Image (cartoon, rainbow, N blue to C red):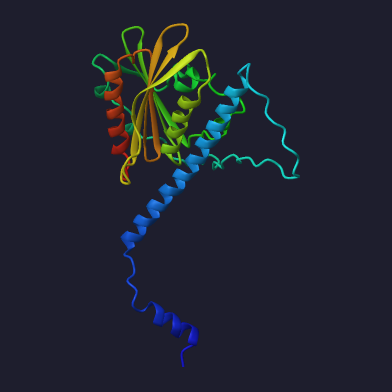
Amino acid sequence: MPDPLFAGLYRDTEQLTWASTEQLRGRARRLTRRRAAAVLAGVVAVAVVAAGTVALAGRPDAAPRPVLPATGSPTPTLPPPYFPPPDPDEPPIEAAAMLQPGDVTAGYRLAGDEADDEWSFASRTAGCLAPDHPLRQHTPPPRAEREQTFQRGADELLFERVQRHHNGNRALFVVRAIVEVCRDEGVALTILEDVPLRFPDQLWELLVVRVDHAGGGSSLHVFVAAGELLAEVWGPGLIDPAEAGRLAQRATERLCDVQLYC
């Protein structure tokens, strides 16, 4: 005689229609995206609160913050995220993921396998965040990276850096957040083009930022996130927004060429 527990379970489930394997995979992907969105929303909240606190504290007419009575419970804080340690067996970035000479403006030639970090977005916005700003803790280190330089004439330079992250979209989210909370009076950040994730099956996004310097001059920075990869293109030779947009499109195609799920 069958066990009553299993007999009841069979009776309650024999008429159910089970989802297919592909449906289950689709639900898993949607759940993963929702969880990722929730994590990013938490980072945004921390960044906005921190930025608002800094701005309020800097106002001379700001009212003093009230002192709340002690409750015996410590103030909750968001713990820093866990990033896995570097894997010594991590494969290098493929050459096919990088921009090719035919992708850039005519006259540029490949001039080296290193980039000048002094012109990068991180260098240009180094004063935007305080050393203890939460966003600094939420900037994921790359698992691997590759760089290159294009040159035309004596001083027209383009640099590219492609990094592999556990989530390239999260890395680009941090860039967007820096644009929103930057408090450096020496620079002004403007988003010229922004194509965020809009559809469930869209796995790439791009961002073009202009950095204007108080002492004069500006620089354009192109970011493309696709799958695990994040590309940044910058340099003194990149001054035309239309060219920046075209490079963003070509960088997207290159990143997607080497990833099956892009």
In the rendered image, the residue lying farthest to the bottom is 1
Residue at left 31%, top 46%?
A: 201
Residue at image coords 37%, 56%: 27
Can residue 130 be seen in this snapshot?
Answer: no
Image position of 59 (left or right of 193) = right
Residue placed at 40% from the left, 82% from the top? 11
Q: Image quarter for residue 196?
A: top left
Left or right, 80 with reference to 170: right
Q: How many marks?
A: 0
- Give how far across and how far down residue 236 sits, in percent: 38, 12
At a point 44% along the width and 31% down the height, the residue shown is 145
| Displayed quadrant of residue 135 | top right
Which quadrant holds residue 119?
top left
On-image quarter of the C terminus: top left
- Please state which of residues 46 and 151 is positioned toward the viewer in this rendering: 46
How far from the left and from the top, in percent, is residue 144? 46, 35
Give the camera-side residue of 112 and 70.
70
Q: Is residue 202 visible?
A: yes
The answer to whether residue 9 is left or right of residue 110 is right
Q: Residue 31: percent from the left, percent from the top?
A: 42, 53
